[in-house]
Each structure stands twice: as C-alpha cells, then as structure tokens.
Image (cartoon, rainbow, N blue to C red):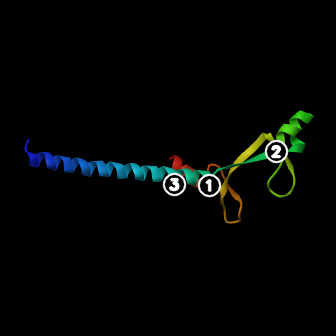
Amino acid sequence: MTEQQIDLQERELDYWMTRAYEAEGNLWKAEARIKAVRELHRQFGVYEHEDDCPDTTDEHREAHHHVDSDGYGEEYCDQRPLYTLCDHCRDESGERLDWPCPTIRALDS
C-alpha cells in the first residue's frame, strides 16, 4: 500500500469517525428532548374521596389520606385510584386528557 493510499484511508476514517461522533451527539440530544417531554406529560392520579375509603383506622388515614392539590381542601385516599389523566394536556374546555395522552402514545408507538 502506498503512502497516498494510506493517507486517503486515514482521511476517510477521520471523516466517518466525525460522522459517528455527530450522530452520537444527536442521539443524546434526542433522548434528552424525549425525557423532557415525558416529564412534562406525566400521569396525574385521581383517587376516591376519603369518605368512600373502607379503612377508617387512624394509621391508614395518616399514611394514605391527603389533601388534594385541586384547591378545594378535599381529602382523598391514595390507595383507591379511580383513573389517571395527563398533567399537561387539556381539551378545549380546559379539562385534563385521559392517560396516556396523544403525545405519550406517539412516543410509545
């Protein structure tokens, strides 16, 4: 193999190594963006009201009954899930969309 052929192969190798590093960087960026979207579109659990919980022991109430974040001061039991919604997506009237939302379904497909 001549010096010229070796030089050509080294330049070609450098070219492909650069492309590989660029592709790897693009993959990391894409993965970070997907992670950010998933963090934004997270599940929001809806639970039964505390009055509907069959366990009325103090231990259970202290561990599993919480004031909901809806601003009404109602308490709910975290052991009695009803359904989940997307914490980000809303319909035209401002209501949360069912989980998984269209964005998460698209990422998972």
Label number found at residue 48: 2
How far is disc 3 from disc 1 in space, using C-alphas?
11 Å
Residue 37: image x %, image y %?
Answer: 57, 54
Amino acid type indicated by mark 3 = Arg
How far is disc 2 from disc 1 in space, using C-alphas?
25 Å
Q: Residues within 10 Å of mark 3 (few under 14, many from 20)?
A: few
The residue depicted at 61 percent of the width and 51 percent of the height is: 39
**Mark 1, secondary structure of its residue:** helix
The residue depicted at 87 percent of the width and 35 percent of the height is: 60
Residue 15: image x %, image y %?
Answer: 25, 52
The residue depicted at 41 percent of the width and 51 percent of the height is: 25
The residue tagged 3 is: 33
How far is disc 3 from disc 2 in space, using C-alphas?
34 Å
Q: Is residue 83 visible?
A: yes
Amino acid type indicated by mark 2 = Glu
Q: Count all numbered tags in the image, as a single digit.
A: 3
Amino acid type indicated by mark 1 = Leu
Q: Are marks 3 and 2 in contact (CB under 8 Å)?
A: no
Residue 63: image x %, image y %?
Answer: 84, 37
**Mark 2, secondary structure of its residue:** strand
The residue tagged 1 is: 40
Question: Vertically, is 24 above or below 57?
Answer: below
Mark 3 or mark 1: whose residue is earlier in sequence: 3
The residue depicted at 17 percent of the width and 46 percent of the height is: 9
Residue 65: image x %, image y %?
Answer: 85, 42
**Mark 3, secondary structure of its residue:** helix
Q: In the picture provided, is 17 more to the left or to the right than 31?
A: left
**In the rendered image, which quarter is residue 58 located in?**
top right
Label number found at residue 99: none
